[in-house]
Image (cartoon, rainbow, N blue to C red):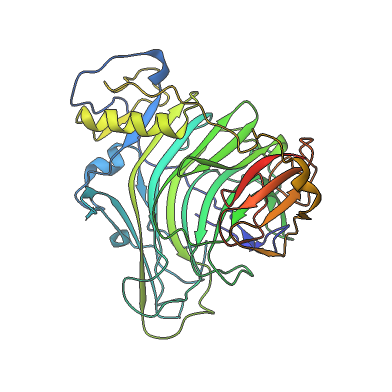
Amino acid sequence: MATTRTTRRTAGVAAAVLAVAAAAAVTTAADRTADAAEPAACDGVLFDDFAYDSSSDPDIAARGWTVRTNAGGPGVPGAAWPASNISFPTVDGAKSLQLRAATDGTGGGTSHAELFHQQKFFEGTYAARVKFADTPVSGTDGDHLVETFFTITPLDAPMDPDYGEIDFEYLPNGGWGETGPIFYQTTWETYQAEPWIADNTHTAQRQSFNGWHDLVFTVSGGHVKYYVDGALVADHSGKYYPETPMSVNFNLWFIDTAAHAGGTSVYHQQVDYVMHTAGEVLSPAQVNARVSGYRADGVDHTDTVGTGGGECPTEPPTTEEPTDPTDPPTGGADCATASDWAFGSVYTAGNTVVHERSANGDPSGPKSGDGEHLWRANWWTQGSEPGWTPQWTDLGAC
């Protein structure tokens, strides 16, 4: 699995390019441990609670997962990807996937971790509960690493139009030109490695995301929408919409060793569950209800994606629909006293700005056509565009 990282087009930071090898045998039936209703909406579901014993558990491969062990990118040249960096401990009371990455500042002393599924997932809803870490479990802090949940289609040739990638990427210590924590949502059209050409769009939040977070993205109707803890943070569309089936992936890796301060540092990322529903758009609240239903039924794994069969859990999902952050009252006369939003300016809680959000979460790209709105900062923020990040509350049209 080869990956190239380089400078991002609009924020001066690198973007993800991860080529994924074909993996494992196709699962042919769901592992169900209780009876449940069978509405058509649940035809084609992957749900995995990661109830495995170790990275060598035979159920991992039998269920379509691959524990990566081959050398190559992304990250530090010469780094290893040992199977032992994947484990399944109990974390905060629940069995979880754990990814481990360690470095002593050298390529030979660096190891990464990756677990990925088959290339068979396309439109629908993707969800995972992920625990990001700002600090190492041992050793000195400050390393440039990437904590992820993403999907990808391998690149068959430079500028392959069928390539696709949808990324959640958290950099707790910065990297790619950033000096502090930053959380990216990036959607790819394609790329070329030599000479480097990147064709993607991204949204970012510059703040700490240490701890557990509910991550959801939906692929439907020409839009890839990203949600963090129930809030819509990005909506990418146009040519960036994927064209082909993708694999589901988690990896933890170091961008470089430039910030390493000595000794050996060990970092963990944990994942409580992963779920995909084929062709079905769920709100974050519906995702939570669906996961609760599987657990109430005693189901720790089911995979009917591509088989045409499947069962929903007993507990029905809620009917709550996702809401865009731009459904406001009116900003009124306050718009006249607020300054225009600026990418490089720092804003603190209560600051107000006037801004027309972009069409695709790229402040330098085309406007949405919504017109100018008044926005209030919810907390410290810099470089997070109003209308695409949870740092801002929409106070209405001007």
Seen from the viewer's position, the closer of residues 48 and 84 is 48
Instruction: Determine the residue located farthest toward the bottom in the rendered image.
Output: 262
**Is 77 left, or right, of 264 in this rendering?**
right
Seen from the viewer's position, the closer of residues 128 and 241 is 128
Seen from the viewer's position, the closer of residues 374 and 116 is 374
Instruction: Determine the residue located farthest toward the front in the rendered image.
Output: 333
**Is 232 left, or right, of 215 in this rendering?**
right
Q: With respect to residue 270, does 41 lie above or below?
A: above
The C terminus lies in quadrant: top right
Instruction: Give the percent coordinates (x, y) of residue 244.
Output: 58, 33
Q: Quadrant of residue 288?
A: top left
**Is 278 left, or right, of 393 in this rendering?**
left
Q: Does residue 120 appear in this view?
A: no
Seen from the viewer's position, the closer of residues 164 and 129 is 129
Q: With respect to residue 119, does 115 lie above or below?
A: below
For the point 71% across and 65% down, which residue is it? 345
For the point 37% across and 24% down, which residue is it? 317
Instruction: Give the percent coordinates (x, y) of residue 214.
Output: 42, 44
**Is 291 left, or right, of 384 in this rendering?**
left
